[in-house]
Image (tube, grey):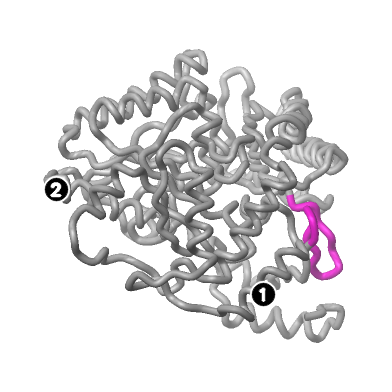
Amino acid sequence: MSLSDQAILEQLQALDRMHHLHPFTDPQAVKKAAPFVIEQAKGAYITGQEIRLLDAMAGLGCVNIGYGREEMADVAAEAIRTLSYYHSFSAVSNPYAAALAGKIAALAPGDLNKVFFANSGSEANETLMKLAYLYWRRKGRPNKRILISREYSYHGSTLATTRLNGNRPMIEDFGLDGGADVIKAISPFWYRCGGDLEPEEFGVHAAKEIEKKILAAGADNVAAVIAEPVQGTMGAVVPPQSYWPEVARICKEHDVLLIADEVVTGFGRTGNWFAQETFGFQADMMTLAKGLSSGYAPISASVVSDEIADVIEGQSGVLQHGFTTSGHPLASALALKNIEIIGTEDHVTRVRTDIGPYFAKALKSLEDHPLVGEVRVSGLIAGIELAKDKETREQYPLEANICNHVSQMALVRGLIVRPAGNVVVLCPPFVITHAEIDFMVGVMRDALDETYKAIHQS
């Protein structure tokens, strides 16, 4: 659909404002200003209303292989012609879902070999919550019901996964406080929570805080710890290297399942196929979504270890869980092609050895700016922490909207980044070039300069 005709554009914007309830959007903002309509995208760029923008967020951290790949369009067309839809209930499969399950198992760390398909990261995480409960019930330990998540976490928007989140407004707005079945531990967020400890000391300290939560609740009551290897949505929190091996050791010692939410980090984002490899630990379960299809179709996967699968499948009876479009042929075909592209173009190695280090070095140069407290990077995910006082690590009050100002100043210069409290998050496509990173860092410096100037003029 072409938006070159102003009348057509205005008609679409009017329909959107009247009828479209946008996710994570203030409805009053849509009433005040017409929505920005994206028309097309290619590589690392999106275009809408004759404005071309470098997307340093890869959509929502999902378009790993870049936008507009012709080979993906060809696969989609062929899959729709061949098998537009059939379900996977009652022991039915399709060639794409079967092959994709095998491919994920072949790539996954350790013995994570059994795959359940859904449509989003939220559904994948909720699936693993239910499978964890089922596992312990079939082990004769039904009291193991408590889940431990962390501050600054994000695991989804369903009723169940929202309660896992460390984002207070998501919980409070819907009245989801209460109940003892979800416990929050501290995040390995050294910049804000580390105090006088060195980062590696703090990593061990943060892990042991999880152990304290397990012991306080009683290990016989704790089903699982669920955590993102890098906490992306709430600020690209990259943990100290000491953190994850200690968390894994603690979970194993206390017979608590460890669920790695790799919705953002899976499929190369941190420079390995999975962030478990980057940070040196092994989970009992993991979730995948965004990079699974690079956002070309809604699909997610919940992956469990052989031991867990053996217990769940060891008793007869229907698995009372599923979604109409689990293992959808089109989504599965696109995910297979996406993984093939990541592999054949060697994007994982490139993120680890070339574009990732270049990205890190370029962004780290911003740490000399008076507004920047630190820059955190793992592969191609980064957080630029804004600080009121660099020495004390004091934050600006959120109501000052400093981060939003920086992101808006970047946007008017042709760059999309994501404000997250007092952090600017960047999560670009794997196809981004050195020159585009140079442009990105130049824009960010200009945006920071203009914001700093505005603060000191007020």
Q: Residue at x 17, y 50 (%)?
A: 138
**229 magenta-colored:** no
Label ID, residue 142: 2
Residue 72 seen in the current view: yes
Image position of 439 with respect to 33: above or below: above
Q: Left or right: 385 with respect to 222? A: right
- Residue carrying label 1: 78
Q: Nearer the viewer, residue 142 or 203?
A: 142
Q: Secondary structure at mark 2?
A: loop
Quarter of the C terminus within the rendering = top right
Label ID, residue 108: none
Q: Residue at x 68, y 68 (%)?
A: 75
Pinpoint residue 26: horizontal percent, then vertical percent. 56, 64
Task: Give the overall secondary structure of the magenta segment.
Answer: strand
Q: Left or right: 60 with respect to 187? A: right
Pinpoint residue 272: horizontal percent, then vertical percent. 60, 36
Residue 369 seen in the current view: no
Quarter holding residue 348: top right
Q: Which residues are magenta?
A: 42-55
Pinpoint residue 394: horizontal percent, then vertical percent. 56, 26
Mark 1 Cα-neighbour bin, 10 Å: few <14, some 14–19, many ≥20: some
Quarter of the N terminus within the rendering = bottom right
Q: Nearer the viewer, residue 444 or 87?
A: 87
Quarter holding residue 455: top right
Image position of 368 with respect to 18: above or below: above
